[in-house]
Image (spheres, rainbow, N blue to C red):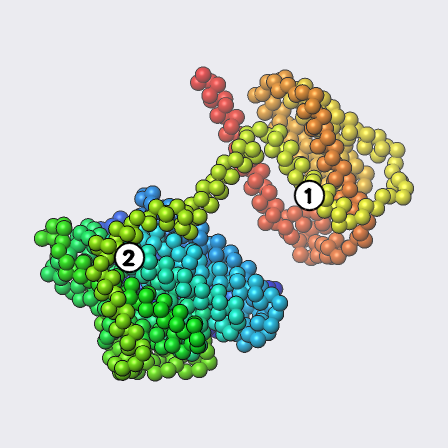
């Protein structure tokens, strides 16, 4: 479905729905609806609730546009709309300095990746012969054989990795937890961070069988999984625990897409759904806990199961699914991940399985921390006044937890209507069966699952007294040498450079500004003219009447007089001589209308500047050294020479009368005027003329305001 948008560039407003886009659209709409319901009581009596809903629904529409776009340019536009709206949502509490800082960090990182993505998509459209995604997918072999395939892939991967918080771009995601919890639950469980995963999945049929894809995507996924697992164990904040577990899950999805066989793709699709369900539920639970207790620190929480029973139910279901315990969808996702690893050959299988077991063990440990420490432990804060949240806040997370259970107990619906179409869209084949019963067979995946749970419980048992203190000691090193430190140093260096160039280039001296402008334009133009064109000197002087020569002599005389003038009025009058002389040249060469315009402009300029000069000292109070005068003269002569060379270069090319003939033929019929120049100004380029008039009017108002200000200040003084 689509319509032509920019036909000259072959860009269409086209949309398509297949199994892959459908699964993301479902996650976006279902979780979005839950968050909208949750946000009402969460932001009860908040002055900016309306603004929140506008931003959230705008983000939801942008995400839907992204996953449903069938044109890469349209996809990029929605991609950047999600970046912009997420920036506003992360910085929703805009009076908080930390919120503003972290929102800027998120938009800088993801926008930098977005620029790389734009370049990659443009290259993809060029080598694929179309900007339509469906056409590009059909031309996958042509794209893979093209010599620009590698830079195209790398640029697209950079865009996907920054958006989905892959290592080393992962640091923006935990910092984005400064956003309100409904924002974190929506953006960082199923939507914004999954946009990068969607991009990888969407272009998997094109690049998925290449070696570069396998090594780059798989390695990035492994590093991201390990980073998320490691960093999660040093956190005590509920949202930060979940944020780093999200990074781990995104790394797992990236790794599965990097492997790219049928088992890995099936596991990725199932785990995508499982993660969205349990992570959305747990983020909302964290918000409910903070809403009632005023803290998210698990070391202070405990005993909430007696006060918040329904919230506890949602927390237990979500934590159990994240730990991969049966009978929840997270268990099936974990089993399929292990199966995907075992389907590999040789050392790759061993490495994959080890990393998967370590990551899932960490997930089990974090799940135990969330459940036991937060809801069943001994609190260190008073919880006597804590009560269950309103139905709008517990209904959503409970629904997500029960949905994870329902999908496992009745897998046919999930398999036939959701999983199989998505896998088919990526691989062209149907998904394997994902029934629950296969997980209870005494098999290698089940044994690995049991092992990961056992290791996870061991991690939980030593977390508070051993892992926490140990990892906290590494905090200074991580803070000084991690990717976040590199980002901070880069921003600081950029700001220092900006201050340096501001001192050099914007020093408040108008002469310096003009000098740099003339040197830059003259230098670049002169180099281009001399390098790319040959100068054709005229063989003989043109036939010019003697009185025209007399007028031409007035031009340099007026210019020299303006330079040597000692008063503003004398300088302006001398420049007027130059302008009038040029206008007379127009008259003698058959352009009376242009000459009249020049006469009027020169007259008006002299009058206005003369009136302004009445407010200025008559003599210059700005002594110039001989060296300064020589410097200015050199710049002026050099710039004038460059412009003369440009004119000589232009004159050697044959004149194309197409435009002049067009305007001559259409001025009367289209513009109802015989004066071609006037018709061009008023009709053919009316908007441009209107803009020029607006600029002149604003400049006049500005000058008038300055004069009134100076006059008023002088009177008051």
Point 30% across, 81% down: residue: 443
Q: Is residue 544 visible?
A: yes
In the rendered image, residue 649, in percent from the top left (x then y), is placed at 79, 47
Verify CB contact (< 8 Å) between mark 1 and mark 2. no
Q: How many marks?
A: 2
Question: What residue does disc 1 label?
Answer: 524
Q: Residue 618 in the image: x percent, y percent?
A: 62, 17
Tell me which label, 1 or 2, sits earlier in the chain: 2
Residue 209 vs residue 339, the one in the foreground? 339
Label 1 and label 2: CA atoms lie apart by 56 Å
Quarter of the picture containing the C terminus is: top left
**Image spot of residue 674 (x, y percent):** 72, 50
Query: Residue extending furthest front?
Result: 347
- The percent coordinates of residue 444 (x first, y second) are 31, 78
Q: Nearer the viewer, residue 522 or 50?
A: 522
Image quarter of residue 413: bottom left
Residue visible at 28% across and 66% down?
Answer: 361
Q: Which mark is residue 276?
A: none
Q: Image quadrant of residue 582?
A: top right
Give the quarter of the image for residue 148: bottom right
SS at mark 2 in the image? loop
Q: Which numbered tag is attached to residue 233?
A: 2
Q: Is residue 389 visible?
A: no
Question: Where is 48 relative to 28, above or below?
Answer: above
């Amino acid at each position: 479905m689509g319509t032509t948008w920019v036909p000259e560039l072959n860009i269409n407003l086209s949309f398509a729905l297949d199994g892959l886009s459908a699964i993301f659209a479902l996650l976006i709409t279902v979780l979005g609806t839950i968050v909208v319901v949750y946000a009402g009581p969460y932001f009860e009596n908040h002055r900016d609730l309306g603004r929140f809903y506008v931003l959230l629904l705008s983000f939801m529409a942008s995400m839907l546009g992204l996953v449903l776009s069938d044109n890469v340019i349209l996809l990029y536009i929605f991609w950047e709309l999600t970046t912009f709206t997420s920036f506003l949502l992360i910085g929703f509490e805009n009076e908080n300095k930390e919120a503003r800082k972290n929102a800027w960090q998120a938009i800088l990182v993801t926008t930098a990746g977005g620029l790389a993505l734009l370049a990659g998509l443009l290259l993809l459209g060029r080598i694929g012969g179309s900007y339509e995604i469906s056409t590009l997918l059909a031309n996958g072999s042509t794209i893979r054989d093209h010599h620009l395939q590698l830079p195209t892939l790398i640029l697209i991967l950079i865009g996907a990795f920054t958006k989905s918080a892959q290592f080393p771009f992962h640091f923006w995601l935990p910092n984005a937890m400064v956003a309100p919890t409904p924002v974190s639950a929506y953006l960082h469980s199923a939507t914004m961070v999954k946009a990068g995963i969607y991009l990888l999945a969407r272009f998997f049929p094109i690049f998925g069988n290449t070696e570069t894809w396998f090594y780059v995507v798989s390695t990035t996924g492994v590093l991201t999984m390990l980073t998320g697992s490691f960093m999660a164990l040093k956190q005590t904040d509920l949202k930060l625990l979940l944020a780093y577990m999200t990074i781990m899950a995104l790394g797992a999805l990236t790794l599965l897409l990097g492997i790219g066989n049928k088992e890995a793709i099936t596991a990725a699709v199932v785990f995508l759904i499982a993660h969205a369900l349990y992570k959305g539920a747990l983020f909302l639970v964290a918000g409910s806990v903070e809403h009632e207790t005023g803290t998210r620190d698990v070391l202070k929480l405990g005993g909430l199961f007696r006060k918040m029973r329904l919230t506890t139910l949602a927390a237990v279901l979500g934590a159990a699914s994240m730990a991969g315990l049966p009978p929840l969808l997270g268990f099936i996702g974990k089993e399929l991940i292990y199966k995907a690893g075992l389907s590999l050959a040789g050392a790759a299988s061993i490495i994959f399985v080890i990393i998967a077991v370590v990551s899932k063990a960490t997930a089990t440990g974090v799940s135990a921390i969330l459940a036991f420490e937060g809801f069943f432990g001994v609190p260190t804060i008073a919880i006597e006044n804590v009560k269950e949240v309103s139905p709008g806040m517990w209904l959503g997370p409970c629904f997500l937890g029960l949905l994870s259970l329902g999908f496992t107990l009745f897998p046919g619906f999930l398999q036939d209507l959701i999983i199989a179409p998505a896998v088919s869209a990526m691989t062209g084949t149907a998904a394997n069966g994902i029934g629950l019963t296969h997980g209870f067979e005494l098999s290698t995946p089940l044994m690995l699952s049991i092992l990961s749970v056992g290791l996870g419980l061991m991690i939980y048992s030593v977390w508070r007294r051993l892992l926490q203190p140990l990892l906290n000691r590494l905090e200074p090193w991580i803070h000084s040498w991690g990717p976040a430190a590199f980002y901070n140093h880069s921003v600081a260096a950029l700001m220092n450079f900006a201050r340096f160039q501001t001192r050099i280039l914007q020093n408040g001296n108008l002469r310096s500004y003009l000098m740099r402008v003339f040197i830059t334009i003259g230098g670049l133009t002169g180099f281009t003219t001399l390098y790319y064109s040959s100068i054709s000197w005229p063989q003989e002087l043109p036939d010019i009447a003697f009185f025209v020569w007399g007028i031409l002599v007035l031009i340099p005389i007026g210019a020299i007089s303006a330079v040597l003038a000692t008063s503003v009025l004398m300088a302006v009058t001398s420049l007027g001589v130059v302008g009038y002389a040029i206008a007379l040249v127009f008259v003698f060469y058959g352009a009376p209308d242009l000459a009249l315009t020049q006469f009027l402009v020169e007259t008006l300029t002299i009058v206005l500047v003369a009136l302004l000069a009445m407010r200025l000292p008559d003599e210059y109070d700005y002594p110039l050294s001989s060296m300064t005068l020589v410097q200015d003269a050199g710049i002026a002569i050099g710039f004038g020479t460059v412009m003369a060379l440009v004119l000589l270069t232009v004159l050697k090319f044959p004149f194309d009368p197409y435009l002049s003939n067009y305007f001559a033929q259409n001025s009367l019929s289209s513009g109802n005027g015989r004066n071609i120049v006037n018709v061009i100004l008023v009709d053919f380029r009316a908007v441009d003329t209107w803009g020029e008039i607006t600029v002149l009017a604003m400049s006049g108002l500005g000058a008038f305001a300055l004069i009134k200000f100076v006059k008023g200040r002088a009177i008051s003084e």
